[in-house]
Image: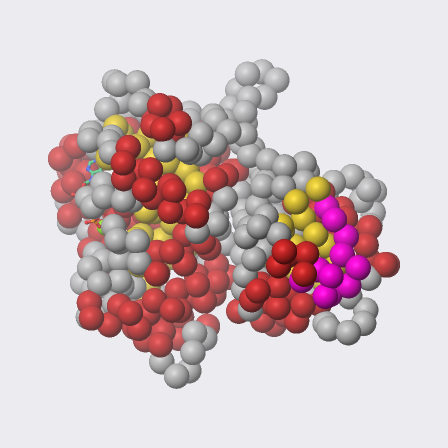
Amino acid sequence: MSDWVMLSAEKSRDAVRRLGASLDPGGRLLVARDADDLRSMVASAEAGELGVIVGPVEDGVSDINLAAAVAKDGNARVVVLAGERTSGSLRSRAARAGVDLVVDLAELGEGPGAGDEPPLCDGGRTAGAAVPPQGPPTDARGGATPAPEATPVGVVDAPVLVFCSGRGGVGKTSLAAVSACVAARWGMRTCLVDLDLSCGNAYAALGLPGGSDLAALSSPEGVTPELVGRLCRAAAQGVSLAGPCERPETAELAMPHVRALLDLLSREYDLVVVDTSTTFTDAVAQAAQRADRLVLVTDGRTPSVASLARMGGLAVRLGVARTRIVRVENRADPRERASHALARAEVGLEAARAYRVVEGGREVVELLAAGRACELAEPGLAFTDSLSAALAQMLAELGRLPEGEEPRRASEGTAPRGLRSLFGQRREAR
Ligand SMILES: Nc1ncnc2c1ncn2[C@@H]1O[C@H](COP(=O)(O)OP(=O)(O)OP(=O)(O)O)[C@@H](O)[C@H]1O
Ligand SMILES: [Mg+2]
């Protein structure tokens, strides 16, 4: 359960209350008297203790300015702006000002069922959203069912999945690149962002000779849709790539603009997948804070509880809600039982979902080295199916699983296994 404080004009108060209930069904919602009262309540609370919902306000400061001020004060866990007929430019302004979520109250509806808690999508950034702690929930027949956090209503920001690790060489780039290809195969326009700004090589997994230069984000024109459009390079059908930096020494130029870049991309694409560096740079921190799912990758062959604990702890201190953190044990031996239940407890990530991606062997290494990540997106390989299952379940939790047989089967873990042999695939690919 978490605490929220709201401010709204009398006439919209009920709608804002319903919004609060849908954002955090178990949360407690306090009502501020006025803008000053709201800001002082947030300022006097512990950092990250209060979530804020600013509804339409009638006098004094405008609602967007108030939400921006609260976001700038920096003490709120999450800042939500609830408006009436919110325009695209208002959403852009709000995103630039650090407001986490803009919701159109008109789109929540006043029709039948409006008195219930309406489903609401926040792009997965709901603090304290009720996410079951472990394993997919089951339906009445005992089958796995996706557990959407919300259904898209009026908010269209694409989910942002950020792959991180406290150690090098565990498979961040491989999993991010193949996930982007799998999502594209499911019909999602996907952008893979390489935030390993100095040494990134995501372009190589996608078979490109190079990436795009994110140092350009520091250009005087600012982070505009046009600039970001130029920085997105077509890599494969449905997959674009942005980043890293052309020259390692210019990485710092890009860093301050990462949040703005991700915000823009999440409005342009259906899914944003972020690869990061092993070092927790400012760029990685911004991505972690912006992540709808922060995916902590470990190498299942040599799991390191220490590096997982370091990353998990750092993410939580940065304000990433534990419910947004998931763990992927990569290169797992499918014949061995998962070891992550224990590690989760040791590193304080009990609530984090854990997935396994199985060891794909020499052929997966070779296909990735040859820039053929998208060939690994086709179901039928244990590596691909385990990765697709993790991706599908993350998207399902966020209410963003695309329709279609493949994503559905992936989310249920019922992809036809073992039908495709790597050797057969290699022959086909030649
Ligand atoms: N599940 C897997 N099965 C087989 N090989 C894998 C798997 N995951 C990753 N690899 C291989 O492991 C190596 C390291 O992977 P990758 O470059 O993706 O790691 P990384 O975490 O991005 O490394 P860095 O920290 O250097 O950026 C690569 O050769 C890749 O092909
Ligand atoms: Mg890498």
| Residue 348 left/right relative to 5 | left
State the image coordinates of residue 249 (x, y, percent, origin top left): 20, 70
Is 235 covered by the magenta stretch? no
Q: Nearer the viewer, residue 14 or 320?
A: 320
Q: How many marks?
A: 0
Q: Residue furthest right?
A: 11
- Residue 139, relative to residue 247: is it above or below? above
Is 30 covered by the magenta stretch? yes
State the extent of the magenta-drawn residues as a range.
29-39
Which quadrant, please, contains the N terminus? top right
Confirm whether residue 318 shows in the render.
Answer: yes
Going 33% across and 37% down the picture, which residue do you hit?
309
Going 62% across and 59% down the picture, which residue do you hit?
43
* Quadrant housing residue 92: bottom right
Q: Nearer the viewer, residue 382 or 276?
A: 276
State the image coordinates of residue 120 (x, y, percent, origin top left): 66, 46
Going 82% across and 57% down the picture, which residue do you hit?
12
Q: Residue furthest top?
A: 141
Q: Nearer the viewer, residue 354 or 224?
A: 354
Going 15% across and 36% down the picture, which residue do you hit?
363
* Quadrant housing residue 409: top left
Which quadrant, please, contains the C terminus? top left
Q: Residue furthest front?
A: 44
Confirm whether residue 407 shows in the render.
Answer: no
State the image coordinates of residue 398 (x, y, percent, origin top left): 53, 42
| Residue 70 left/right relative to 286 | right
- Residue 367, relative to residue 223: is it above or below? above
Q: Nearer the viewer, residue 320 or 32?
A: 32
State the image coordinates of residue 261 (x, y, percent, origin top left): 42, 66
